[in-house]
Image (tube, helix red, strand yellow):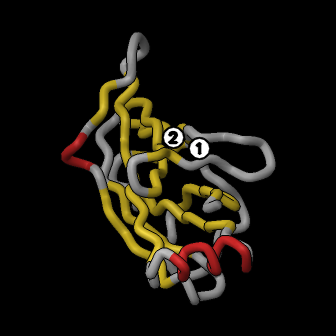
Amino acid sequence: MVHLSKVLFTDQDTKPPLLNLTSFRMGQNVWVWVDLRCPEACRAQLASFGESEIPLSLYWYFDPGASPVLREDLKTDRAFKASALPLRVVIPARLTPGNWIAEIAYGPDRICTWDDQRCSFRVRMIP
């Protein structure tokens, strides 16, 4: 059904990024670009359920090195118009120094990239 086409981290929100950044300095803007893959059959299925929007949640886990900790206070909810093309949203992130893991969810389920089945995306904030 709904899959991620790509998830990219960048320091801008005005044009699609060419490169995915994996580390940022404190004070630097962090934007998460999420592109969805929902072909015509997927959109038809959503329409049959009466859904005109695709609700997504962005979850952040702080990774101190042992076991990642979910930060519920950083969760961000967004909705795509199912009819929009491209299916893209840009979400700002405010993160403290350290290692972070982002996961995208559609309803109660996390979603992964179509091609390589990646479900978690890492970024580092440098002091």
From this view, report whether residue 83 is shown above or below residue 99.
Answer: below
- Determine whether label 1 and label 2 are within 8 Å by CB: yes
Q: Residues within 10 Å of mark 1 (few under 14, many from 20)?
A: few
Q: Provide residue 59's location: percent of width, then percent of height.
A: 37, 46
Q: Residue at x 38, y 57 (%)?
A: 57
Element under disc 2: strand
Instruction: Please state which of residues 49 and 57 is positioned toward the viewer in this rendering.
Output: 49
Q: Amino acid at mark 1?
A: Thr
Residue denoted by label 1: 22
Q: Provide residue 87's location: percent of width, then percent of height.
A: 60, 77
Q: Which mark is residue 123?
A: 2
Q: Which mark is residue 84?
A: none
What's the CA distance linking mark 1 and mark 2?
Answer: 5 Å
In the rendered image, which quarter contains the N terminus?
bottom right
In the rendered image, which quarter contains the C terminus?
top left
Mark 1 vs mark 2: which is more N-terminal?
1
User: Which image quadrant is residue 5 in?
Assistant: bottom right
